[in-house]
Image: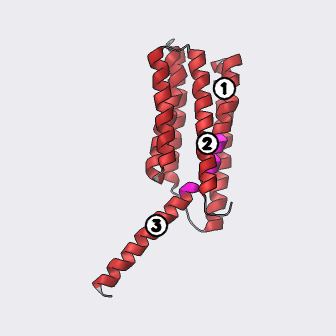
Amino acid sequence: MVEDDASALLSVVRRTRGRTRSRLAELSWLPWVLYGVLSLIAAPLTWWLGEQVNAFYWTLAVPLAVALTSWYYRRLEVRIGAESRIATTLVGASVIAVGAFGTGAVGGAFGWPMLAATGPAFSVAAGLSIFAVDQRSLGSALAAGVIAALAGAALVVGADARVASTAMLVVCGLVGIAVGINCRRSSRWPQ
């Protein structure tokens, strides 16, 4: 093989890999929409019934959502013949889950209601940042930025913890659904 042929072949392989990763990232619409809807359901629970009911809700909802998401990705990988990188997804999901539960628990245990109210939103933003880098997704990066900025604003203005917590759930829900719909619309693969 001539050096120019090898260089051209490597260039084609790099472009194909980039297109494949991009298309796989576009297929991430289901987790975005699913967690967005779960967040919107959690908002009135938090508002009317309190953080304890919200924590119980997420303790049940997260494992079910992870199982549904895993099933969706496995089914899709078999259908399109490409495997997604599960390790990064697990790291991002772990950052979100551990951070959200941890900041909520620490805030509740030490009487820091604003940590309990906004900490989970910062954890979601951190997890979305991991997804954004892995998937090279501008939508994920923007979502992370919006969520972190609004959580920071709630801290700065000293909002009531219940209002801040409910608002963060609504924002995370709406942002998640919007990014998911955008991924679905831009997807080039059959669903």
Q: Earlier in the sequence, mark 3 or mark 2?
A: 3
Residue 13 location, x and y as percent?
42, 73
Which residue type carries mark 2? Answer: Ala
Q: In the rendered image, which residue does mark 1 sit on?
A: 43
Going 53% across and 15% down the picture, which residue do you hit? 159
User: How far apart, in angstroms, are the residues tagged by discs 3 and 2?
Assistant: 27 Å
Where is residue 125? Give x, y as percent.
48, 36
- Residue type (three-letter) at the residue carrying disc 3: Arg
Q: How is the image coloured?
A: secondary structure
| Residue 161 versus residue 63 in the image, above or below | above
Instruction: Pinpoint residue 120: horizontal percent, then vertical percent.
Output: 53, 28
Q: CA distance from mark 1 to mark 2?
A: 17 Å
Q: Note whether residue 105 is visible.
A: no
Residue at position x 66%, y 42% in the image: 34
Q: In the image, what residue occupies the spot 38% across and 73% down?
A: 11
Disc 1 and disc 3 in contact, CB within 8 angstroms: no
26 drawn magenta: yes
The residue at which mark 3 appears reads as 17
Q: Is residue 186 magenta?
A: no
Q: How many marks?
A: 3
Q: Of helix, strand and loop, which one carries label 2? A: helix
Secondary element at image label 1: helix
Residue 178's disc is 2
Q: Residue at x 51, y 59 (%)?
A: 22
Q: Magenta part of the protein: which range? A: 25-35
| Type of amino acid under label 1 | Ala
Q: Residues within 10 Å of mark 2 (few under 14, many from 20)?
A: some
- Residue nearest the viewer, comparing 138 with 120: 138
* Quarter that holds the C terminus: bottom right
Position of 10 with respect to 49 (left or right) is: left
Q: Residue furthest left?
A: 3
